[in-house]
Amino acid sequence: MVQYKFTYGKARGLGEPVRLLLHYAGVPFEDERIEFGQVQEMRDELPFGQIPLLTIDGAYKISQSRAILRYLARKYNLTGKDEIEEAKVDSYLDFLDDLANNVRPYIMALRGNGEDKDKKYEAAKTYIETKWEKFFNKTVDASGSGFISNSGLTYPDFVFACFYETATKINFEPIINMKNFKLIHDNVKSLPQLKEYLSSRPDSQF
């Protein structure tokens, strides 16, 4: 049996979707949660000098959160039912990353000194309302599955669920108020395969 070690920090961040996917798939893995200072110590051993990192059988190392997700999704059949849907599923995650890139300045202001926090909040809110929300709702409504894709659960759903959770932690209403975003979050969190992990994992704001 293949052996996985997943290395990331103690926050949810970019690592939590990978953890959720592995727990959903019922795959045993070493969940290595390290302090920020440890990253500096091991930087030269990391493929690109950063985490997250997936180590396979103690030998093969995959870096970059999206690459790790896509590798595991292919292995555990969470990419869609055919090549066309696989391409669409990839596009859904890219679409979410567009949102994340526009919300991130506000999140960083919350984590730092709060400089221009209100201005960055309004910029993110405007982006969502004018360039993102309509297309997201159209996609989820058309899927009819309660997830982002027609065939049901796929790997971007774990990322959507984690992003919505972060929005609730920081009380970011433009995302909290999107019923389809909440729908995906709630459906992911209701998966019986995740019940034990979700009830026992460490809590963090981000």
Image (cartoon, rainbow, N blue to C red):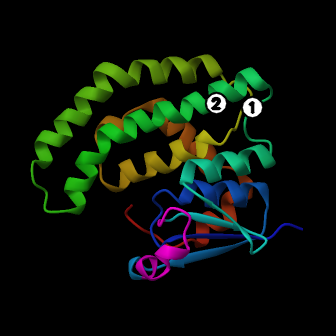
| Magenta-tinted stretch | 38-50
In this image, 166 relative to 7: left or right?
left
Q: State the residue position of label 1.
A: 80
**Is residue 146 among what the camera can see?**
no
Whichever of callouts 2 and 1 sits on the residue coming sooner in the sequence is 1
What percent of the width, then of the height, locates residue 41? 45, 83
Image quadrant where residue 20 sits: bottom right
Q: Amino acid at mark 1?
A: Gly
Q: Residue at x 50, y 62 (%)?
A: 48
What percent of the width, then of the height, locates residue 151? 74, 28
Q: CA distance from mark 2 to mark 1?
A: 7 Å
In this image, 63 relative to 114: left or right?
right
Asked if disc 2 and disc 1 are in contact, CB closer than 8 Å, the reply is yes
Q: Residues within 10 Å of mark 1 (few under 14, many from 20)?
A: many
Q: Residue at x 80, y 25 (%)?
A: 82
Count of marks, rendered view = 2
Q: Residues within 10 Å of mark 2 (few under 14, many from 20)?
A: many
In this image, 43 relative to 140: left or right?
left
What percent of the width, then of the height, locates residue 104? 31, 46
Q: State the residue position of label 2.
A: 89
Q: Nearer the viewer, residue 1 or 11?
A: 1
Q: Is residue 137 above or below residue 66?
A: above
Q: Secondary structure at mark 2?
A: helix
Magenta stretch: helix, strand or loop mostly: helix
Q: Amino acid at mark 2?
A: Val
Image quadrant where residue 192 sits: bottom right
Q: Secondary structure at mark 1?
A: loop
**Is residue 115 among what the camera can see?**
yes
